[in-house]
Image: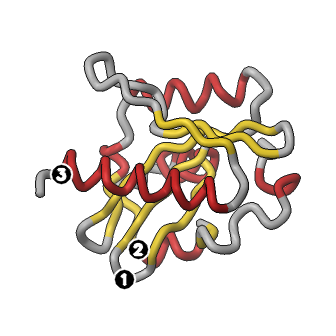
């Protein structure tokens, strides 16, 4: 399986999991121009933007965040939509939700990679993310 097909499979799986949690979910699929997010999800009048990253090893190189994704996440917040999120998946530890603002602070201080351990510390496991939506969409 190619990296692209693995990533697409994770996007589909993640979208399905959000739908099971009661979200309206839409996958963005503009491969020609490079979409700013992979998924937009809405629940209880609040919209959430997600970019999905499937990691084969035990780290997430921050270089995988493309410039258009960074700019879109920043603009998402500037428009009053709260923070954007990255859904990062590891085989061993599953999917964790990381607010872009947290990733941005790591980049600001010179980090180029987040380990699986880092992500487990700063992220929220998908199973428990969203239990209190008011706490998860503040900038």
Question: Which quadrant holds the N terminus?
Answer: bottom left
Label ID, residue 92: 1
First of labels 1, 3 by sequence position: 3
Image position of 134 (left or right of 83): right
Is 98 located above or below residue 89 in the figure?
above
Instruction: Count up the numbered dots.
Output: 3
**Where is residue 35 shown, x and y percent of the image?**
41, 25
User: What is the crowding at mark 3: few (fewer than 14 residues within 10 Å), some, or many (at least 20)?
Assistant: few
In the displayed structure, would residue 53 be above or below residue 96?
A: above
Q: Is residue 117 above or below residue 18?
A: below
| Label 1: few (<14), some (14–19) or many (≥20) C-alpha neighbours in 10 Å | few
Residue drawn at point x = 53 percent, y = 66 percent: 96
Nearest the eye: 49 or 80: 49
Residue 106 picture location, percent across and down: 51, 53
What residue does disc 2 label? 116
What is the x, y in percent for residue 109?
Answer: 51, 50
Q: Nearer the viewer, residue 77 or 25?
A: 25
Q: Residue furthest bottom?
A: 92
Q: Position of residue 26 (x, y in %)?
A: 55, 36
Q: What's the residue at 84%, 57% (across, down)?
A: 135
Look at discs 2 and 1 and give the one toward the viewer: 1
Q: Is residue 79 above or below residue 84?
A: above
Give the labeled residue for mark 3: 3
Are the residues tagged 2 and 1 within 8 Å (C-beta)? yes
Q: Residue at x 37, y 56 (%)?
A: 10
């Amino acid at each position: 399986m190619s990296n692209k097909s693995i990533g697409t499979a994770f996007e589909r799986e993640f979208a399905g999991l959000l739908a099971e949690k009661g979200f309206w979910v839409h996958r963005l699929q503009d491969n020609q121009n490079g979409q700013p997010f992979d998924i937009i999800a809405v629940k209880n009048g609040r919209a959430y933007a997600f970019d999905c990253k499937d990691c084969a090893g035990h780290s997430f190189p921050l270089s995988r965040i493309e410039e258009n994704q960074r700019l879109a996440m920043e603009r998402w917040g500037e428009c009053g939509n709260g923070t954007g999120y990255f859904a990062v998946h590891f085989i061993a530890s599953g999917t964790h939700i990381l607010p872009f603002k947290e990733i941005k602070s790591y980049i600001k201080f010179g980090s180029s990679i987040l380990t699986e351990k880092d992500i487990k510390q700063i992220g929220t496991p998908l199973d428990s993310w969203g239990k209190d939506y008011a706490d998860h969409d503040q900038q």
